[in-house]
Every structure is written in structure tokens, then in C-alpha cells.
Amino acid sequence: MADTTDIKKGYKMLIDRTPYVVVDYQFVKPGKGQAFYRTKLKNMVTGAVLDRTFKSGEKVEKADTEERAMQYLYQEGEQYVFMDNETYDQMRLTGDLLGEAVYFLLDNMNIDVMLFEGRPIGITPPTFVELDVVETEPGFKGDTSSNTTKPATLQTGLTVNVPLFVEVGDKLKVDTRTGDYVERVKV
Amino acid sequence: MRFGGRVLLTAEGRARVQDVTGTLDVSCPAPPMGAWVLVDGEWNGVEVVGTCEVLTAPHGPFPRPGGDWPSFQDHGGRRLELLRQRALGRRAVRDFFDQRAFLEVETPAAVPSPGLDLHLDAFPVAGANPPRWLITSPEYQMKRILAGGAQRIYQLCKCWRREELGAHHEPEFTMLEWYRTYAGSEEVMRDTEQLVAHVARALRDGSTIIPGKDAPIDVAPPWQRLTVAEAFRVFADVEVKDVLPDEERFFRILVDAVEPQLGRVRPVFLTHWPATMASLARLHPDDPSVCDRFEGYLGGIELCNGFGELVDPVEQRRRLERDQRDREAAGKIAYPIDERFIGALEEGIPPSGGNALGFDRLMMLVTGAETIADGMAIPSARL
């Protein structure tokens, strides 16, 4: 069994049968007192963040999680259907498990699906995805200033702030970690 | 002009060379990247025109990933700058104590007993016969110097503690420890606040405002005094007597709720610790349920731990024997009792106060560094 010496950023542990990932930790030790690890943990299912302090040497349980390469097939009602690239098994995830990631899903996209004890609990989209602009105010010709922006709606429903020169039909590179516009993709 | 330096950039027929004062462009047959060179030439207002003799050329690529050059030079030479600040800090500490007639002393690093605190673990010295451990603090040996008749002593020395590693912990670190006779906690707290203000002024152009970890802190004396009982009441809404004897719960509350709130704007001394956590402190003269012990906090970080010292040899032996039993019960090695230390107490030490202050943490707070390792030339991770 693991103990607090295994704690580091990204370590996945089980608390009350729920998987958490360590997002930050600090070794703390009052001069004449015992040592603790002060941690910030993210619930891998809900995304909620929890502060938890472990006594140094305390046993922790490693979460049995696995990331598998899958392909996003299609949406069916409230469910999103994925296929395992290796086993061809299909898995259905509900929108609430995907959270913001639904805005980056494109049909047939390859994506990592996080499994906990064999059940899907979330997905990690690629860091950058390319999405089409479906709606935005027309810009002004020749205005290339980058300080002013306007909203644009993309094919997945995501709204991003873009420079004025972006037009409907453009393909944009978006950072999935922040949901921010990166650049217009040359077609 | 002639100067020695290191080649940081090369192009056809020229090189950019860095010496301790900055960088200069040199027009010369291009030397290898990273070479240490001796430049000899004339300054024409833009660059030096002359020769560039290679003294030492690096083996392998430059800069070497994870090498010492990037470790000291990255971020605008941050580590080198912190080393300069550290040297100033050491000098300021010595000035402070020398001006107050404290004698600087040195005591051994390898000792027969490294101290019996339940939560301190020492490095054994391999092959030592009789057994020796590296000090976790120079306390026993410094108190023997008090028994020998010195009245005010201080020491800046290395200490070692196993399994302590984090932003504010390194297994090998520098301790500033001092003792004064005819004194208790109050006198030593006054030393502490004046010392820290003195070091701050020496490094910060006369200002007592230091960057701290998250927010600036004004370290000008006097610092706030807060008892442990008050702090638990204010920050955790609990009574210490209801928490004890569950020491784990006590430390959990201390670490989670109390410490992060201490000394956010001005430093705080946490005083009147429970008598069971006296360690080498005497019981408080006015209240035997607590001891004459204090810790100083800046920005939620513990800087020092000081005592009105226990000078009663019978009580001291009783506590050390209890500590030995506690260590054994916890499955830890019970270090021997240092009989020469007990002997010094038997010979007699005047009422005295002392403090152990983490010098690396002081430098971190005064320079605004992220970790104590940032201010070390070679922290444990780079050994």
C-alpha cells in the first residue's frame, strides 16, 4: 500500500471510494511536532477541489485509474458514445461527466478517456483543437489590431473572444485547457 | 583591455562574452560556445576588437541541461544574486551579535546524542565507534559552553534532519542558535525581533519591510505576542485543553487552521506552549500548565523556536528518559542520553534563554525567494 511519500503532483488516490488527483502539496512540520502533507485534491469525477492534510507516513490508497485512447463517435440524446481504439468496445458518457470538454468534441476525434475501476469518469481532449466559426459580427476590412476582440460562436457551441479579422467559416485553433482562441488556421 | 569571461553567443567573426560585471561583444575569430576565454583588445565604442584566447572549452553541449551554469545563471542570475544576499545576511547576523558582546562559537557536527525529540530523526555517522549522529541542533554542546562560564554565545552552523524535504525544509540546513544567561523567553524574543529587523535593514536598504512569501511583512519591533491558547481560540474556535492530550489533533489544528494565519502582516510570537511540549524549556514561572517556550512566525511560516531553558538536571533527565520511551513506543531508535550535557546541568547553568532560528527561512523571507533551496548554493536535489 502507498503512503504519503508517494504524494506528488498528479498522483491519483482514492478517498471514500472516489478518485482524487493531487494538484498541489506542501510538506509542513512544526519544529517540535509531527510532519504533515497539506494537499489540494481534485475530485476526478466532479472536479471539486478539496483541502486535505495527511499525517506523514499515513497510508494512502492509489486510485485504480487508466487512460485509454478512444474515438468519439456521435452524440445520442444526453449520451456521448466513444469507441476503444484497441478493443472496439463502445462506452457511453453523460454530458455531466464531460463538463466543458463537450465544447471540444468533434465526430471521429481521437481522445483519451479516463477509466476508474473500468468505468469512464471523464475525458482529456487534445491540448489544441481546430473548430469552425459559425457566427460572428463581420469585421472591418484592414483592421488587424489585435487589442480589440469580439465574440465568435464555434461549431460546438463554444464562444471565444477573437480578433476583429475573424469571419464566419474560418477555422480557429483553440486551447482546450483555457478555452481561449490561439490563432486562425491557414486553410 | 583584457578580461576573462565566458562565451555565451557566437556568430561569424564575433562572440558575446560575459564576465562578472556584464556582457561585451568581441570581434574576433569565433571561439567555441561556452568557452572560458581571455579577451585582449581595444574598445571601439560598440565592441572590443582583438583576440580571444580559449582557456577552457566545455566538453559536450553548452549550456549543459541541468548543469551548474544554468542553475546559477538562469532567471537573470537569480541563484548567484541570492548567494550574494545570503553572504550579506550572514555578515549582518555576525554584526548584530558581535555588537552585543555575544561570542561566536563552533561545536561538533557529529555527536553522541542528536537529541531525543519524538519527531526529529538524525543521520547516523557510518563507521563511528562509539556511535555518532549528525546534530539536529547544537543545543547540548552550546549549553555546555554556558556551564563553562560564557554568558552570551551564538553559532551559525549546519544541522541535519532526516526525511524533511519541502519548500521550507531541506535535510541539511543552516541554523542560527544563540543563548544568553540571566534571561528567559522575553529577553530572547526581544533579541529575535531586533535581529530580524537588523538583517532586513542590511539587505533592504534600511527598510524593515520584507517581501515575505505571499505578501510584504513589516518586521519592525515589537512583534505581536499571542499565547497558544489564544491562537487556538481565535483561529480554530477550540480550547487547547479540550484538544489535548490528543497531540496529533493538536498539531493538525496548528498546521491547518492556526499557522497559516500567523504573522501575515506583522510577525507574531506564539507563546505559552502546553507543558507536555516543553522539550528543553522550563515550565512557565507563572503557570506550570504551560512552558516558557515561543515560536516566531512570519507569513504563516515558523522561523524560530526558543526557550527559557530548563536548567534542572533531575527534571531534564526525567524528560529525556520519557522521550526515549516515547521513541521506542513509536518504533524509532532511542538515542542515548548525552551524559556530558546532563553533567553540565549538574555543574550548574545560570537561568538562560536561547533560540534556534532557521537561517535559510530567514533569507527566503527577506529576499522573497520561493523556497529555502533557492537560496542555497547546492540544495539536496542538486547533489
Image: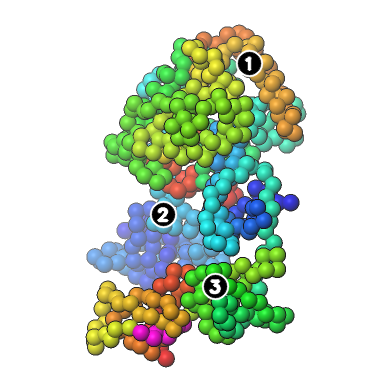
In the image, residue B118 sits, relative to residue B343, either above or below, namely below
The residue at 53%/27% (across/down) is B240
Q: Are marks 1 and 3 on the same chain?
A: no
Residue A106 badge: none
The residue at 67%/31% (across/down) is B133
Mark 3 residue crowding within 10 angstroms, few (<14) / some (14–19) / many (20+): some
Query: Closer to the camera: disc 1 or disc 2?
Result: 1
Mark 1 residue crowding within 10 angstroms, few (<14) / some (14–19) / many (20+): some
Element assignment for label 1 = helix
The residue where tag 2 is placed is B77
Magenta segment:
A130-135
Q: Which amino acid does the dot numbered 1 rest on?
A: Gln
Quick one: B107 or A42, which is closer to the camera? A42
Q: Position of residue B29 (x, y in %)?
A: 40, 72
Quick one: B296 or B32, which is closer to the camera? B296
The disc, 1 or 2, on the residue closer to the chain's N-terminal end is 2
The residue where tag 1 is placed is B316
Count of picture labels:
3
Q: Which residue, as the protein is rendered here, is positioned at the far top?
A: B347
Residues marked 1 and 2 touching at CB (< 8 Å)? no
The answer to whether residue B63 is magenta is no
Q: Which amino acid does the dot numbered 2 rest on?
A: Gly
Which quadrant of the rendered structure holds the N terminus of chain B?
Answer: bottom left
Q: Position of residue A80 (x, y in %)?
A: 58, 78
Distance of label 1 from label 3 (alpha carbons): 65 Å
Element assignment for label 3 = helix
